[in-house]
Amino acid sequence: MKNTTLRSLLVAGAFVGGIVAGAAAEKAPPIGYTDTPFLPGGQWRVHDLNRPRPQAVQSGPFQTEAPPADAIVLFDGKDLAHWVSTKTGAPAPWKVVDGCLEVAPKKGDIVTKEKFGSFKLHLEWREPADITGTSQMRGNSGVFLMNRYEIQVLECFKNTTYADGMAGAIYGQTPPLVNPCRPPGEWQTYDITFEAPVFKEGKVAKPAYVTILFNGVLVQDHTEILGTTQHKKVAAYEPHDAELPLKLQDHNNPVRFRNIWIQPLKTPAVP
């Protein structure tokens, strides 16, 4: 009788354990998709599961960069004077911790009070050293140029996800050329040169372009941006103002930023 009861309990435990494990597996974020639309050119889908991941490379030692004299310092380690909530327009709800701007999970994205067209942007970001999660749930955030074109922020030192969702990617569009991500807990740098799109009569006269140095390594080389960032959809342009705010994303991860400055540039004219 005892043996029968023990066997029953073991079987029941295995069954319940299997349900729990199955539920956990179902909740695990995907590392890619096979049912999304194809990007222009037709070779790869948006967030394609089979798209090759860029090769990991070792970047040089971390080097910060002081803002030039003509730069607008958007975060100096002291306060959030240049930022507001995208939800309410009220003062930004994120935190200043140890001289860093830290995402306040579930408080919403923040945008600059100032608006920009073309520019050069420098910022530094860091994932927690004790980070958890996998794929897109591992330190996710983003830098949205003109409040709509996302450069992905993600822990990608040893984290597998879809290629166009990796750090340094134009999210949902173009993966980085290589992966120079440092380990969690170490500072990373983005130096982004952005050329704003130009619209005429409600149509794109010139698309946007972006060049990115990620930890000093070239990962986007005057890459054309296909349009407003979307998840699981092909990006498309919508006419907008010549100048718009810069946005930082709250994706429920306590990512930190610091040393954020920007230099406005002149957008090339279109005949």
Image: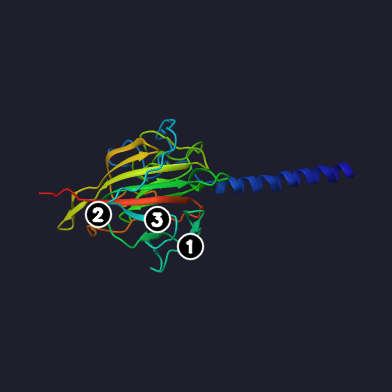
Task: Name the secondary structure under disc 1.
Answer: loop
Residue designated by label 2? 117
Across and down, in percent, residue 101 comes to: 46, 55
**What residue lies at 76% left-to-right and 43% top-to-bottom?**
11
Name the kind of residue labelled 3 in the image. Phe
User: Which of the colour schemes (rainbow, by chain, secondary structure, one colour) is used?
Assistant: rainbow
Q: Residue 75: which numbered mark, if any? A: 3
Q: Residue 107: which numbered mark, if any? A: 1
Identify the mark nearer the N-term, 2 or 1: 1
Hey, which residue is sitting farthest left in the picture? 271
Name the kind of residue labelled 1 in the image. Lys
Q: CA distance from mark 1 to mark 3?
A: 19 Å
Nearer mark to the viewer, of 2 and 1: 2
**What residue lies at 37% left-to-right and 61% top-to-bottom?**
82
Q: CA distance from mark 3 to mark 2?
A: 19 Å
Name the kind of residue labelled 2 in the image. Gly
